[in-house]
Amino acid sequence: MAIKYVSEHHSSDDPGGLVKTVLDMGSEFPGPAEDIVMTWLLRLDDDRDPAEVAARLLADYGYAETPLPEGACGRVIELLRETADNKAGDRKARPLRRGGRRGRG
């Protein structure tokens, strides 16, 4: 069953418009930032590279190089920047995997 998001900010880079909603909230966003970024990652289609998508979101939303805002919203941006810096071709460790017990090796 496909999920249908109704947010006006929904896109393949930001399923459900979750990141845009948090950024629009700014200092009003109570957090936790880690939950938002994890939810965003889990909503991405399997064929999407999180590093590329995060870099594009930051650029599209105007947060690629701006100073971090205070609070949980700033932490969301920080985590997205860390994700964007984790380019698949640059990884020295094993690539990120999905899955439970079958993903362990």
Image: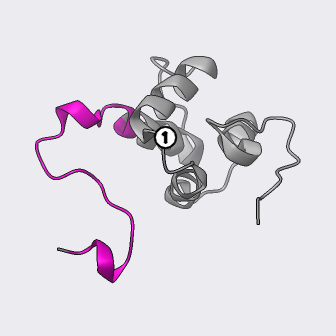
Give the percent coordinates (x, y) of residue 30: 66, 56
Residue shown at 29% from the left, 33% from the top? 87
Image-based side of 16 in relation to 66, left or right? right
Instruction: Using the image as rendered, state which of residue 9 and residue 78 is in the foreground.
Output: 9
Residue shown at 63% from the left, 23% from the top? 61
What is the basis of the colouring in this image? one colour
Q: Is residue 30 visible?
A: yes
Residue shown at 54% from the left, 53% from the top? 33
Image-based side of 21 in relation to 78, left or right? right
Instruction: Using the image as rendered, state which of residue 90 and residue 25 is in the foreground.
Output: 90
Q: Is residue 28 visible?
A: no
Residue at image mark 1: 48
85 within the magenta span:
yes
Give the percent coordinates (x, y) of residue 51: 40, 35
Tell me the amino acid under the disc marked 1. Answer: Arg
Question: Quick check: 38 above or below 87?
Answer: below
Residue shown at 29% from the left, 37% from the top? 86
Helix, strand or loop: magenta stretch: loop
For the N terminus, the quadrant is bottom right
Task: Return the residue found at the far left.
Answer: 92
Instruction: Using the image as rendered, state which of residue 8 and residue 96 is in the foreground.
Output: 96
Q: Give the range drawn in magenta.
A: 82-104
Question: Quick check: 43 above or below 92?
Answer: below
